[in-house]
Amino acid sequence: MQQDFFPEHHEVSRRYFLRRSLELGGGAACIGASGLNDDLLGDEGKPTAAKQVTLDALVKKLEFLTKPAAFGTVERGNPLPYKLPPEKLKTAGLTRESWRLEVLADPASNAQVTRPLRLADGTALTFDGLMKMAEKHSVRFLKTMTCNNEDAPLGTGLWEGVPLREVIWTAKPMANIRRAWFYGYHNEDPKQEFRGSLSIGRILEDPPGVPPVILCYKLNGDWISGKRGGPVRMVIPECYGFKNIKWLTKVFLTNRFNANDTYAAGNNDIDSLMKTMARFISKPRRGQAGQPIPLTGFAQVGVNGVSKVQAWLHPKDKPLPKDDPFFQKAPWRDMDILPAPGDFGGGLPAGTIGPDAASPVHGFNSKTGRPDSWPRVYALAHWAGLLPGVPAGRYDLRCRAINNQGIAQPLPRPFRKSGHCDIERVSLVVRD
């Protein structure tokens, strides 16, 4: 998925490319025939005067956060729940005014819950009740929403909600609880049911440096839309999208050991944590012999972070290394990971992130409004670099990320059942 950066990243990238272009003997920062996009070139593959574009112009739209309407969407349901008529939306509890959440003991196990939250007796949690809890417990954090089987993220947002554990404790669970099963509304049709689960241990206690599992009601400072899973959805920082159940209506506390996830039957590793991987943003297709090749991209920051991003240009007529399926011995070149932006974009209301923000963002300094470390795990980092000029010919261009353990993509988990992380390849034609 091609994403935008924001002007702060534009400024960082502009300075970077100016400096690196001069270091490599590329002269001015004008892309010319080594442009990043085919649409910068004339019919004969040569830049026209009108299409001469500076790197400054090419990256000026780069933005860190994804506007909610621009997120990629993976959805299910017939009809889709958020497309129900207004009265049906209200009846289904898919408006803020009508939303209710039940927290119940699983009737098929011996879980003990002394004050369940039930629709039948009027004790289910309302949206107003959730907002009351938010006054004391609201949490905000950056997270990239990404699909287990897609080759690029759906989008990166600032998510806000109340930790699920705070709601569970109001139901007064007592004993015999090993997992929480949670369900989203799907037209009262068991065949369309969308569900997921977590160990109760993960819900009640967070790994070091990781935000809590939340009942999420805001994205980038605004109420979550129905298309994005509102009025309330699950957001689990470390998990792929299928765990982050939309249109949340019910939580069962159970002593059963097994998961109930919809996608357990979909041949996925349902407990997989997000993987680290790199992708191109602008994919160069043509270049000019001897001219530096500018690259930009993003790295999805998985469970073990990201320490490097690298690129490799390989002639198509040259054999690939033998007995090296993941190209571990290839002559990769380091790119630069860009720093955190000054403004994160994504349509955030003023003062959402920063020293004047009404509430802190997880992993950010409350006084300065800047991240304590960068990149942030389970979010994105942007990268940029210049490859030296090469002779005319046909090439394959690849990029990869290396995590904080020094392990290069697609390792340590190369199998797609636990998340897509193949090395991206782009064809490049270099002409005299």
Image (cartoon, rainbow, N blue to C red):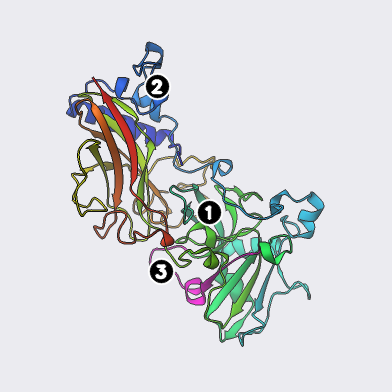
In the rendered image, is residue 292 in sight? Answer: no
Q: CA distance from mark 1 to mark 2?
A: 36 Å
Residue 325 against residue 280 in the figure, above or below:
below
299 sits left or right of 232 in the view: left
Q: Amino acid at mark 2?
A: Leu
Q: Position of residue 380 (x, y in %)?
A: 40, 48
As rendered, which of 425 and 290 lies closer to the eye? 425
Residue bounds of the magenta highlight: 193-211
* Mark 1–mark 2 CB contact (< 8 Å): no
Q: Which residue is mark 1?
A: 159
Characterize the local packing of mark 1: few (<14), some (14-19) or many (20 or more) Cα atoms within 10 angstroms.
many
276 sits left or right of 263 in the view: left
In the rendered image, is residue 421 in sight? Answer: yes
Q: Amino acid at mark 3?
A: Pro
Q: CA distance from mark 1 to mark 3?
A: 18 Å
Characterize the local packing of mark 2: few (<14), some (14-19) or many (20 or more) Cα atoms within 10 angstroms.
many
> Could you say which disc has been placed on residue 40 in the image?
2
When asked about the image quadrant of residue 180, the answer is: bottom right
As rendered, which of 380 and 430 lies closer to the eye? 430
Mark 1 or 3 closer to N-term?
1
Query: Is residue 210 located in the magenta-colored stretch of the structure?
Result: yes
> Could you say which disc has been placed on residue 207 in the image?
3
